[in-house]
Image: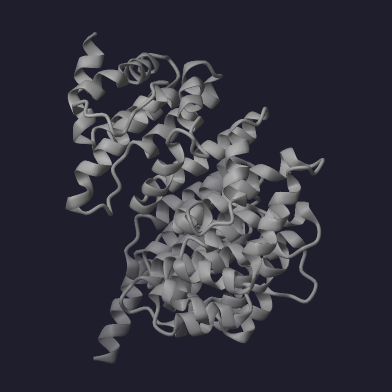
Amino acid sequence: MLLLLHEQTVTCIMTIPDEVFDLVSKVSNGNGNMEDYERICLILSNLTATELSSVFQKCDILKALMSIDLHDKQSAQIAIKLASIVFSLIPLFGFVQSHQEELLLILESTKLDLIEFILKRLRDGLVEPSCSVYNIPERILMSIARLVLHDKLSLSMEAQNFLITLATKCPLGLKSVLGPNVVGTLNPPCSKSEHLIRVSEFAVQLVSKQPEVFKDVENSGLFQPILDGLNSRDPLVRLNWLELGKLLTISETGYHFLNKQDVFSRLLDDLYSSVSDPLGDLLLPGYIGFFGSLANRDPDHWLGSKSDGRFKNILSDAVDNNAISISMVAFESISCIATTPTGRITLDKLFAKGGAFDSVLNKLFVFISNSPTEICTRAVECYSFLLRRPNEIDSEGLFADAILSLNWAIISCQKSIDKTDSNSVEDKELLIAPLLKRLYSLATQPFFEVRVAVFKAIDAIATQPTLTTHIHTANTT
């Protein structure tokens, strides 16, 4: 029986052209050219998995892969093609276990495109049912963790995605990723600021994918750079961390985590003082975007009856700011707040005559009527949030929200509204014709981004039954 198996193996190996062994040996010694690599790819792609395994036993394919000089696009494509063959026809993690040294050489090399490909392939393997955290040798895991700190953003993101997938999809993966070896690699004692941001991006992405691991990530210390950055005395340093802070507060747990650290009150003080700061134009957009995100989660606390009025006043003033970058962020923050039922109720009071935001909708209409293309596009996108019915609204609130949206559209067209007026819905619908006509006019412009924004706005209008009936009329008049 053993003799028969041996004969079958020999027969299998004998079917492999000798040329492939000669070519692999040639290129592994650095004597190959692009035609040699193309020939190797052609031969290997026509072998069975058994035949390919036999080649790997006799030849060092990874050494051949490492010998490719990735100096141009063609050589990079060939390297990726050869790597695809290697990783597609053999058991992935068995190969990882048996070729640790070769993989480490690649992961620690300067062949960045090849490294990204290998990280993607390894990440794909993590979701296989047979995968275990033990399939990833500790040295490979540490090398991938170091790549999170790489200067090339796309490579850093691939390394982050691998670790996130390992932590969320693989049994015991979270324990491995948040263990002292990986965390120690991610948080070296003398990290550069850009490295700290990459590590914090990873931590925020991890908890956004799997909120229940928030406490584990907090205990690992990976959130500490965010706290340090947001509490920095340097306003420009704080600005760099505001976006990450905003992403962290999307989850309720993240919101309460920063609030418990007294981050919000300190940043609100900074925001209030930045209005008169010489760097105000640079700082305000980031701060307004951050607090706009907080107001989206708890509109009554930041803009309603529970607020101290500071952010509300700053947001109102920002709409009138001469710097378009500031006024547009203000519009976008208000539009973001309008995506929840509670946010819409809070804003409706502020949009009313005499309210803190009573001029906001008028000015937004001006922006879509007479602005450069980029600003016009952003303004139209604001309408797609303001006029869209929230998914979370209950059946009893549908009609009330439709009337609210209709009133906002009328105010936007610079028409005053007496909310105690008994005018019918049909009468009110006639007052929004200027807005609909302007949207249809923009839809005929040659700029793709503008047209897409308009279609989003019309789609939002279509979610409100009292507005839908007038869409066709406006298009035909």
Is 59 located above or below residue 353 in the figure?
below
Is 463 located above or below residue 209 in the figure?
above
In the rendered image, residue 358, in percent from the top left (x then y), is placed at 48, 33
In the rendered image, residue 191, in percent from the top left (x then y), is placed at 76, 69
Name which quarter of the figure residue 88 lies in. bottom left
Q: Is residue 40 visible?
A: no
Nearer to us in this view, 343 or 392: 343
What residue is shown at x 63% (from left), y 73% (from top)? 261
Q: Quadrant of the C terminus?
A: top left
What residue is shown at x 46% (from left), y 85% (from top)? 134
In the rendered image, residue 37, in percent from the top left (x then y), is placed at 53, 50
Nearer to us in this view, 395 or 453: 395
Name which quarter of the figure residue 473 lies in. top left
Is 231 located above or below residue 45 in the figure?
below
What residue is shown at x 71% (from left), y 45% (from top)? 283
Outermost residue to the bottom: 1
Name which quarter of the figure residue 73 lies in. top right
Outermost residue to the top: 477
Q: Quadrant of the N terminus?
A: bottom left
How many marks do you count on the picture?
0
In the rendered image, residue 41, in percent from the top left (x then y), is placed at 45, 52
Nearer to us in this view, 241 or 10: 241
Nearer to us in this view, 108 or 282: 282
Q: Is residue 309 left or right of residue 15?
A: right
What residue is shown at x 25% (from left), y 18% (from top)? 430
Q: Is residue 157 visible?
A: yes
> What kind of colouring is applied to the model shown?
one colour
Q: Is residue 227 left or right of residue 76?
A: right
Is 452 located above or below residue 6 in the figure?
above
